[in-house]
Image: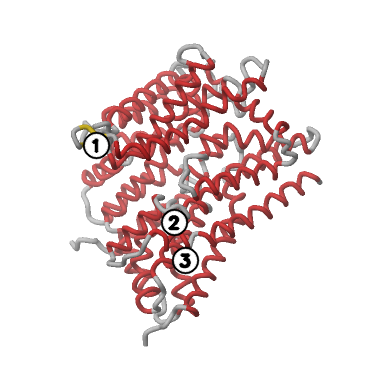
């Protein structure tokens, strides 16, 4: 058996495509692919299960982000979401577009300065931004916001956090993806400075800003009816 | 040295508590949910001591339980009343004056996290770092959330145990997607270990026509987008595609500078991440956090930005072949 197995190993990726297409539970799809792929590469079942355990355990550090949940739970018990809704009128944010535009700018600039932790679905979107966007929508439609429109605004808040974060963080020099690129380039014998890499992230940041601005305006116009 | 051990133990206890409060109702679903979080807690609490094979069995057990969990979301115990979608405050009075008390702990978290990362390298004892340098970000984040929790506890005086009860109710609201970021990282590791990266780059170099700039640029950027979408993560796709097409074809034979090839490729991968349910923590976790009925609502809202930035980046990289490219014969 060759060190890298054969092309048959790629059928492990096919498990993902088939599983997602069949709308199966994604955890099931991922675990199945992680079990099948080493078997296709010629490992024994015992080795395949052990591989699963080894990489799952060494990846535990990723789940550390959930340590914030008790704090969010406490603040929500004390009325954070209601306070966030109050913030909408105090900052005179008249439409959901205003809320999301402000958050987009703040999130993108903070990410470009390396403050990626100033944002996030659990930390900011659920407790603050989604209720604020929904409240602004409610105020704008004089309380006639439908359930569907409310969910649309919450989804837009979540999307704003992702888009602004993704297309902002690469401008910062010491972010994980820049470090990864540098490491991969170095492993291939190419030396580049992080400055050069982050320079090429600027067009993406501007494109994301432009298209989001248009989306926010369309969102407001849809609510204005 | 302060490492991750204590943090994993603490998180393990938190998930054990979640398992306990889920199974208190003594229903069939409560037992399934309890079993799932109990196994997850075990991976945190004892994962370092258990063998790789036992940890693998834990993951398989969790997966099987998760399949049955999805059918019936649990909503029975008292604490679950707390984190409704956007809960009403316990006492509605004086929301305005409550604002700083509620916002300050939330903003303490990023502030302390950043401060910690800046200060950590200087914290030494006999010239040995006191804080594990490989995990400074994670350790700083945990310390920051604890600082936020301490300030909130001091200002708000909740009933004892309430933060953990409502925190674990949030864990149950998110459900099995909560473990997926970690399990996807596991998948990336398994793929590397099984040689998938190597096989995929062999395949891609074989199918693309040689000497055509547009085909190479398109193959590279769409490849980054699609492989990132497939594995839910641009970081796993980058070494494969850069090694297969970016470096040998775009840089070495077309003469493009390596920095834009790398950076633009990575950003095309980010576009792919915005479009896939495999990027669970970005696209699926918010669906359950925000109580959305459409599983693809967040992805749908991201389509314009993802496609627009992807197209712009592909054109930008193609334009560079006119300015900087000097194809070798």
Read off the chain for label 2: B
Q: Nearer the viewer, residue B153 or B197?
A: B153
Residue in view at x 32 percent, y 60 percent: A184
B225 left or right of A210 in image: left
Q: CA distance from mark 3 to mark 1?
A: 41 Å
Residue B54 in view of the camera: yes
Q: Position of residue B144 (x, y in %)?
A: 42, 30
Mark nearer the N terminus (3 vs 1) = 1
Read off the chain for label 1: B
Mark nearer the N terminus (2 vs 3) = 3
* Residue that carries the numbered disc 2 in the rendered image: B228
Residue in view at x 60 percent, y 33 percent: A128
Read off the chain for label 3: B
Q: Position of residue B309 (x, y in %)?
A: 56, 61
Q: Position of residue A198 (x, y in %)?
A: 45, 59
Q: Nearer the viewer, mark 3 or mark 1?
A: 1
Q: Is residue A14 above or below residue A161?
A: below
* Residue that carries the numbered disc 3 in the rendered image: B221
Q: CA distance from mark 2 to mark 3?
A: 11 Å
* Residue that carries the numbered disc 1 in the rendered image: B129
Q: Is residue B263 above or below residue B123?
A: below
Q: Position of residue B40 (x, y in %)?
A: 35, 31
Q: Nearer the viewer, residue A2 or A167?
A: A167
Q: Secondary structure at mark 2?
A: helix
Q: Secondary structure at mark 3?
A: helix
């Amino acid at each position: 058996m060759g060190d890298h197995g054969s092309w048959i190993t790629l059928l492990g990726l096919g498990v993902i495509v088939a599983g997602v297409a069949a709308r199966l539970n994604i955890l099931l799809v991922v675990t199945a692919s992680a079990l099948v792929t080493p078997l296709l590469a010629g490992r024994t079942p015992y080795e395949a299960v052990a591989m699963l355990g080894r990489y799952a355990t060494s990846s535990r550090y990723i789940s550390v982000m959930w340590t914030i949940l008790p704090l969010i739970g406490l603040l929500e018990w004390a009325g954070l979401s209601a306070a966030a809704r109050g913030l909408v009128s105090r900052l005179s944010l008249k439409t959901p577009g205003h809320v999301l535009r402000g958050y987009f700018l703040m999130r993108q600039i903070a990410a470009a300065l390396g403050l990626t932790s100033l944002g996030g679905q659990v930390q900011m979107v659920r407790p603050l931004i989604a209720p604020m966007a929904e409240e602004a929508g409610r105020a704008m439609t004089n309380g006639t916001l439908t359930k569907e429109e409310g969910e649309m605004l919450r989804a837009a808040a979540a999307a704003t956090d992702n888009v602004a974060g993704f297309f902002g963080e690469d401008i910062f020099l010491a972010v994980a993806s820049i470090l990864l690129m540098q490491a991969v380039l170095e492993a291939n014998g190419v030396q580049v400075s992080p400055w050069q890499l982050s320079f090429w992230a600027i067009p993406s940041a501007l494109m994301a800003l432009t298209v989001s601005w248009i989306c926010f305006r369309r969102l407001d116009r849809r609510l204005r009816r | 040295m302060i490492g991750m051990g204590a943090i994993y133990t603490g998180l393990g206890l938190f998930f054990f508590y979640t398992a306990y409060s889920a199974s208190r109702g003594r229903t069939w679903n409560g037992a399934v949910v309890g079993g799932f979080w109990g196994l997850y807690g075990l991976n945190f609490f004892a994962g370092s001591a258990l063998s790789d094979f036992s940890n693998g069995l834990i993951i398989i057990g969790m997966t099987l339980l998760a399949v049955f969990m999805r059918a019936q979301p649990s909503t029975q115990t008292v604490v679950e009343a707390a984190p409704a979608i956007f809960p009403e405050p316990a006492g509605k009075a004086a929301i305005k004056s409550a604002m700083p008390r509620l916002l300050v702990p939330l903003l303490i978290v990023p502030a302390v996290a950043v401060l910690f990362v800046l200060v950590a390298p200087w914290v030494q004892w006999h010239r040995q770092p006191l804080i594990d340098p490989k995990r400074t970000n994670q350790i700083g984040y945990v310390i920051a959330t604890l600082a936020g929790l301490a300030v909130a506890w001091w200002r708000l005086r909740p009933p004892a145990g309430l933060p953990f009860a409502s925190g674990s109710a949030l864990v149950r609201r998110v459900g099995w997607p909560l473990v997926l970021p970690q399990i996807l990282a596991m998948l990336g590791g398994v793929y590397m270990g099984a040689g998938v990266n190597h096989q995929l780059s062999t395949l891609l170099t074989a199918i693309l026509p040689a000497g055509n700039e547009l085909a190479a640029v398109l193959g590279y950027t769409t490849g980054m987008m699609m492989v990132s979408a497939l594995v839910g993560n641009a970081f796993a796709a980058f070494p494969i595609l850069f090694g297969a097409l970016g470096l040998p074809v775009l840089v070495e034979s077309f003469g493009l500078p390596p920095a834009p090839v790398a950076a633009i490729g990575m950003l095309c991968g980010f576009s792919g991440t915005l479009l896939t349910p495999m990027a669970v923590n970005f696209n699926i976790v918010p669906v359950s956090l925000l109580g959305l009925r459409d599983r693809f609502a967040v992805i749908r809202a991201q389509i314009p930005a993802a496609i627009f930035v992807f197209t712009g980046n592909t054109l930008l990289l193609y334009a560079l072949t006119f300015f900087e490219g000097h194809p070798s014969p």
